Image: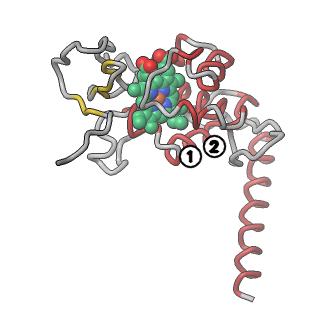
């Protein structure tokens, strides 16, 4: 009984969202601030499992949070327990990840989406940057995300606009970082 009531209220919420978006289209209301204008925010169909939301940008924001993208690409995300304003997200991390591959940094994705097309973004995330991508970026997980989810994250990050914050350059194996870094390769205790 309780479950049925719950389902019903979800259905009602879903329906009122549909009605609200239909009304927004009819009245020619502008797209929400910070989202791509026009119908580009609408969700295209997905062959496999994918996140459903009112717009691609909303799906993208949700995905970046649950897929932990901010943890490595947003300065201060874990320290602030996720309370970082969207304007300050995805401008990169100045803490390096060091291993036998050298030291790599969570890139400024606000800059990346300005430079790269959406198709290129999908290609990078599904091929581990053509095999050049280093850990701990979870290339193996993004390779399994649906095409629609990958595009939703691109649209969300692009909707945040450019943010010119600089991130340190990757370092070759053996080079000593000048700033903060963590060792990612496991070490055995005594
Ligand atoms: C554990 C840390 C970590 C997590 C989690 C993470 N990244 Fe990364 N990401 C990195 C690092 C480090 C690099 C740089 C790797 C390199 O230089 O080879 C990177 C690189 C990238 C690149 C390539 C940028 C370029 O230069 O073209 C993209 C795109 C990207 N990440 C997107 C994402 C997305 C989307 C998510 C969430 C699904 C995510 N990352 C989660 C650490 C992370």
Check mark 2 vs ligand 1: CB closer than 8 Å? yes or no: no
| Label 2 neighbour load within 10 Å: few <14, some 14-19, many 20+ | many
Question: 24 or 184: which is nearer to us?
Answer: 184
Residue that appears at 38% across and 34% down: 72
Please tell me in which quadrant of the rendered image residue 48 appears.
top right
Q: Is mark 2 on a helix, strand or loop?
A: helix
Q: Distance between the residues labelled 1 and 2?
A: 5 Å
- Residue 162 visible in the current orientation: no
In the picture provided, is 45 more to the left or to the right than 145?
right
Coloration of the structure image: secondary structure
Residue that appears at 61% across and 29% down: 155
Name the residue at the bottom extreme: 1
Q: Residue 59 carries which label?
A: 2
Percent position of residue 20, x then y: 74, 52
Residue that appears at 67% across and 27% down: 37
Q: In this view, does 11 lie above or below 138?
A: below
Q: Is residue 97 above or below residue 78?
A: above
Q: Which mark is residue 62?
A: 1
Question: 118 or 49: which is nearer to us?
Answer: 49
Confirm or deny contact between disc 1 and disc 2 (CB under 8 A): yes
Please tell me in which quadrant of the rendered image residue 40 appears.
top right
Q: Is residue 38 above or below residue 81?
A: above
Q: In this view, does 84 lie above or below 13?
A: above
């Amino acid at each position: 009984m309780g479950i049925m009531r719950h389902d019903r209220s979800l259905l009602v919420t879903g329906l009122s969202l549909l009605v609200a978006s239909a009304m927004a289209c009819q009245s020619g209301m502008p797209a929400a601030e910070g989202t791509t204008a026009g119908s580009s925010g609408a969700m295209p169909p997905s062959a496999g499992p994918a996140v459903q939301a009112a717009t691609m940008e909303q799906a993208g924001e949700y995905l970046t949070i649950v897929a932990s993208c901010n943890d490595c690409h947003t300065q201060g995300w874990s320290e602030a327990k996720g309370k970082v304003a969207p304007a300050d997200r995805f401008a990169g991390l100045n803490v390096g990840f060091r291993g036998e591959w050298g030291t790599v940094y969570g890139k400024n994705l606000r800059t990346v989406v300005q430079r790269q097309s959406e198709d290129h973004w999908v290609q990078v995330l599904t091929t581990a940057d053509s095999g050049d991508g280093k850990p701990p970026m979870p290339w193996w997980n993004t390779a399994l995300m649906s095409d629609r989810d990958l595009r939703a994250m691109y649209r969300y990050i692009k909707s945040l606009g450019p943010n010119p914050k600089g991130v340190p350059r990757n370092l070759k194996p053996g080079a000593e970082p000048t700033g903060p870094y963590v060792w990612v390769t496991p070490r055995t205790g005594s």
